[in-house]
Image: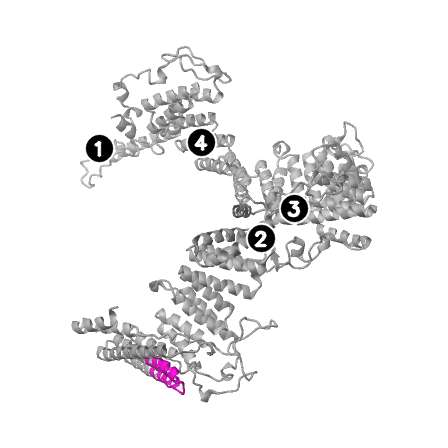
Amino acid sequence: MASSENYLGRVGDYPDSSYQEDQPSLDPAIDPRLFDSSYLPLEPGSGDVAFEDFGQHGPLNTASMSIGQRRLLQEQVDLSGSEEESDDEYYDDNDDPVWNGGHQDYEGSTDAESEEDDGYDPNDAASPPPRKRRRRGHGPFSGRFGARGGKGIKRGPRRPLEPSPEFKMLHSQATEAFIDGDYDRAIDLVQKAILVNPEMFAAHSLLSEIFLARGEKDKAVSALFSGAHTRPRDPTVWHKVARLIQDRAGEDRQKTLNDMIYCYSRIIEIDSKSYNARFQRAAAYRELGYNGRAATEYERILKELPHNIRALRHLAETYIDMKDVRKALQYYLESIEYYMSLDNDENMEFSWSDVNICAELYAFVGEPEAGLQLLSSVSRWLLGRKDDKIWDEYIDDDREWDAGDSPRRIKTDGFIPNAYPIDSYGLGLPMELRIKLGTFRLKLGERYFEEALAHFEWLNPDDTSESSTVFDYADLYREAADALKDSALFPEALRFYRPLQLTEDYADVSFFLAMGECAFACSDLSLAESCYLTVAENDSTNLQSRVNLAKLYETMGERDRALYFVNQAVLLGRESRGRNRRRRKDRRIAQLAKEFQGDAHVSTRIVPRHLANEVSRREALQDSDANRPQQVQYLYSKMNDLRPRMRDGDTDATEDWLDIADALLHDFRTNRVFYPLQKNMIFLGYSREEQKGARKKETVMGEVQEVAERLKEWIGQYNADEVPTSIPNDYYGISFDEWFEIFLEYAFVVSGQGDKDEAYDVLAAAADASVWYHSKDKVRQIHICWITCALRAYDEETLVSEARWFTKEYPFVTDTYRLFSMLSRICGDPNRSLFHASPSMKFMLRQVKFMDSTLPEDHYLTKTWTSKSGVANKSMTIVTRNSKNPPKTASLTKRGENAEPITADDMDVALLVLYGNILYSGNSFYPALNYYYRAIALDPDNPGILLPIALCYIHHALKRQADNRHYLILQGLSFMSLYRRARSKSEIEDNGDKADNEKTQNSVHSLTLQQEVEFNYGRVYHSLGLLHQAVPCYERALELGDQIKSSQNEQNGAEKGKVRDFARDDKPEEDLIVEDFSPEAAVALQNIYALNGNIAGARKITEKYLII
């Protein structure tokens, strides 16, 4: 009974119920609410829980409890009462005065209407009695649940059930075990409580606290996260979960942020106007790098809270990261216009920080003049001089922001002294904005340098006392110094760089490099040397400091030191390129090398150490990085040793070979030099300078090269490692051709193991590599291997795709169309063939149109038509255009050797027949005839064209749309006769003057052609229902099949008795492939006999020809 109550809800939960009166009193041992003074709520700021009576339990030592334990203890105390109150707050509709009032008004109006409608005069015979209206909330269905106006379950989420006594007992015991420090027992008890009432959030919260106390943060967050779903419509719970997830985050920061985003998304689903949740979710998006989503979130906030400063600031930061600064600037300008339209007492939300941000945005977009004007106007407004417009006319100087009225401001036309407080001018302008004014003036050109320096002088850089402004405005010193350096004002820049040495926050590598550059420009060589050596000693990988030191020592005449730093710079440049190439590599190469070598190690490279007093000693390179070339070379030699055994089918050798090849190819594919962003870039070398191929002097290594060239003249020769100028043809000492072979063979082997996707990925990587991308021969080999892998995988879609690639790359080569026809039909589902699919049909139509567009206007007068069967049409012999002997095909490319465009001399018959076959296989017989006729005009005696023309007519005659069936059948039979005649000509040609052996082979071939004709005639008659004509054709086909077999047997017997001298033969004898249609003819004949009752004849045919 208790379980049914928990499932359906207790009647006592609803008004007008006597359920509570009939219930027995609760046992104090299992209901904590009956421990009167034993459970006192925590007072704000109290450090402990007061207990007066502990009942059957001993006194609890609350002084040693943690805050989380006390909080959970209080949750246990208030489990029933507080949850019921909170549930009522969220779920009880009777507490809503708006709803109650509306409900009462609705009932009153309904009752009044019903009474008015029910009242009618029975004596009035002219009008029939009105229909009786049942009042809502009355009648036999008044008590049904959910009825409008009734007292059943209210609309919306149902109120959660009250925790069961068993749950309360388990939860109480789990809390006590947690307080006592018995975490294992507490977990066991609270998990049992969750099984009893999984919808109670308090149990999940307790489980989370227990896991947290044990130091298991991930489990604590998971428990709390699961418990939040027990109150899906309570935003306070989701806020708490998000906060705790953030506080208890482990090492996986990305997972933490995703969980927080989920929590905030649930809050926004509950309350779309929870802007704090939107801000938090946007911040999480930004930290994850999803700047687009963060910007959308901030824009949504600005849409609902226009000109919100917090959203504006975050949106500006986001758009700066997205490189879309102008959009952020537009939002700020709209908000500034809005705030300036308000009264002064209403614009407190907009502050000087926003002016600084807006100025930074103008600096980002490179508009100093506009930034200068906006900074002045907005600052004037914030200082209370909104209507002081006279300064907009003075754009050549900043007299408005002088400290005093004299000597410049007093001379301004329209200026009235003491009209505004003196603090509303220069004295009231924040120092940050004054430095911005100075930087804007510097960017406007040399004309405004004095004005800029006047602004910078407010920092008083010459003051080096303890009260110097550098301790308060160090960032402004650095900003002013960098701006002066960029404007080539090196002496002035040094005045602002020097005080920064007194601070620690801004004395970094870039600071010393910048100050050294200014000192070098000012001929203060000792200061420059000190700055560069400081960087070199503290950053062993800094390249720029070595280059600058080399130039410095060359200027000072110390060529030995200059040469040393040149060598260091070249070495660091190579290592940096190696690090760039290796930053995405894994450790598989080193692991495989150790595995195959055992405990042997490749000798490490020793870096020479010189001039130890000038610079700090270089740290030894890591073993795996230093030995990587040797490891790659060793693995490559090991792979070559395993190749013969792998090709012989050795399983272990194959696995080892694949492991090595996979590691080497992964190293190659992760090198970004081989995969530039623009595929049309040609591989020029490994360094960035070689890739660019120009403006080499502007790079760091270009400077090294210049210094090295100058030092050559002094020492007579330059022996150091120079930057390579020739294009390399190897990688790790392995030539690119050998890498190419590894790519292809690896793809071939893995495709044989059934992993076609891996094979395709490797081939695609080889095709995209810049070292082969521009080589037509390499690319063609890659696609040939692609076809081979697809054949091994029986992948029809890839075969068709590759056939299309060859057709598109070599449109004037006839064999490409034959290849397309073969590959499209070699595998796949015959019921769903891609051969006549819409993509293939459209592609071939484009090829036909392309070739038509390249034909000359007089192409029909330019060639001697020759039948593919070998018979020339003498009546059509005409002189060929521009050449006595034109090539049979145009070229393997669309352009010649001199890059001139190539056009077709004539239409390709194979292309026309192929497209006709595609249309024919799709039952488009009449459209196919158009292309067959074009083909037969070019090759009149080709039986491969005459047969499909005949079949097109016959098949179309059998369709319902045929308008003249007999005419179409006669047309088809006439072309069948032409087809028989063309095959007969082929027989005559084959039986010409040939040797005896060749005559025997030609006789077999002639019999095969006769059998083909008889079988095709039988199929035509069979499809037309002319069985009396089809049966003789099939029988003759079977007789010819017997003759073919006897001729083959005679030929094989003659070959056995003949001794052949293979050494004197020019070429070995090829096996003759003979096509026999006897099985097909036998099956057709069997069906005819069986369907017409000749069972004996069908059995005889089956036993003779169809039984193996």
Q: Are marks 3 and 4 in contact (CB under 8 Å)?
A: no
Which of labels 3 and 4 is toward the front? 3
Which of labels 4 and 1 is toward the front? 4
Q: Classify mark 3: helix, strand or loop.
A: loop
Quarter in which the C terminus is drawn: bottom left
The amino acid type of the residue labelled 3 equals: Arg
Q: Classify mark 2: helix, strand or loop.
A: helix
Q: Position of residue 452 (x, y in %)?
A: 77, 41
Characterize the local packing of mark 2: few (<14), some (14-19) or many (20 or more) Cα atoms within 10 angstroms: some
Mark with earlier residue (4, 1) = 1
Q: Name the disc covering residue 219, or none.
A: 4
Mark with earlier residue (3, 1) = 1
The amino acid type of the residue labelled 1 equals: Pro
The residue located at (27%, 17%) in the rendering is: 24
Camera-side residue: 1084 or 1068?
Answer: 1068
Q: Position of residue 343 (x, y in %)?
A: 63, 34
Q: Name the disc covering residue 633, or none.
A: 2
The secondary structure that dominates the magenta segment is helix
Camera-side residue: 322 or 522?
Answer: 522
The amino acid type of the residue labelled 4 equals: Lys
- C-alpha span from label 2 to label 4: 47 Å
Count all numbered tags in the image, as a single digit: 4
Mark with earlier residue (1, 2) = 1
Q: Are marks 1 and 2 in contact (CB under 8 Å)?
A: no
Q: Is residue 877 above or below residue 775?
A: below
Which residues fall within the magenta stretch?
Answer: 979-1007
The amino acid type of the residue labelled 2 equals: Gln
Which of labels 1 and 2 is toward the front? 2
Q: Classify mark 4: helix, strand or loop.
A: helix
Residue 1005 visible in image = yes
The residue to which callout 3 is attached is 605
Q: Is residue 1106 above or below residue 690?
A: below
